Amino acid sequence: NGKVDTTAKAIIHEEVDQSRFITVQFITRGSAGLPWQMSVETRQMRVHPGQTAEVDFTFTNNSHQESWGRAVPSVSPSSATTHLRKVSCFCFQEQQLQGDERLTIPLVFQLAKDLPEEISTITLVYTLYPVQRIALNPLNNNNAAGDKI
């Protein structure tokens, strides 16, 4: 699996390749220690290379307490990684959910027009991981920003 860049990319205005479709599949996975559920509005979509697409992901905190998590992406085949431009993604930063909160966030992406011809399906997997936060210590100004561990 290819690890995806976790910074936003600008949409490149290029001609859409109407001659072919790429099937983009979305898989979500939970992780031990995080009482969240992540779902996607559609498990797959067909996208033309050069086209910008959007799909909604929903996060639900199944506990009664606030918690933090991060969705870490991977792409298969790994050769498609550099051709998948994520314009807006929840994976760029940690997410905070209050107890019993439900939040829907879009993923906006573009497939590069120069995606190799042999690639007809791309699978994008998001795995949720807990993020531990430490409390601010008023006696320790070195941690004024609430650093993560």
Image: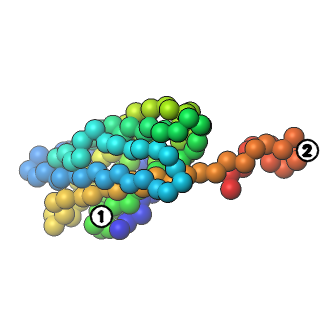
Q: How far from the left and from the top, in percent, is residue 97?
A: 54, 36
Q: SS of the residue at dot 2?
A: loop
The residue depicted at 11 percent of the width and 52 percent of the height is 20
In the depicted view, which residue is nearer to us: 57 or 5? 57
Separation (CA) of disc 2 from disc 1 = 47 Å
Q: Earlier in the sequence, mark 2 or mark 1?
A: 1
Residue 106 picture location, percent across and down: 37, 37
Residue 133 position within the rendered picture, expressed as x and y whole percent measured from the top left:
67, 48
Residue at 41% x, 44% y: name it: 37
From where the camera sits, is residue 10 visible? no
Q: Does residue 86 appear in the picture of this structure? A: yes
Question: Which one is closest to the eye, mark 2 or mark 1?
Answer: 2
Specify whether 23 is left or right of 129.
left
Outermost residue, left direction? 19
> For this rendering, which residue is in front, 84 or 148?
148
Q: Kindly identify which numbered label has been placed on residue 76.
A: 1
Task: Tell me the kind of residue under disc 2.
Answer: Leu
Q: Residue at x 49, y 38 (%)?
A: 61
Name the element at disc 1: strand
* Count of numbered circles in the view: 2
Dot 1 crowding, Cα within 10 Å, few <14, some 14–19, many 20+: some
Q: Which mark is residue 139?
A: 2
Q: Quadrant of residue 94?
A: top right
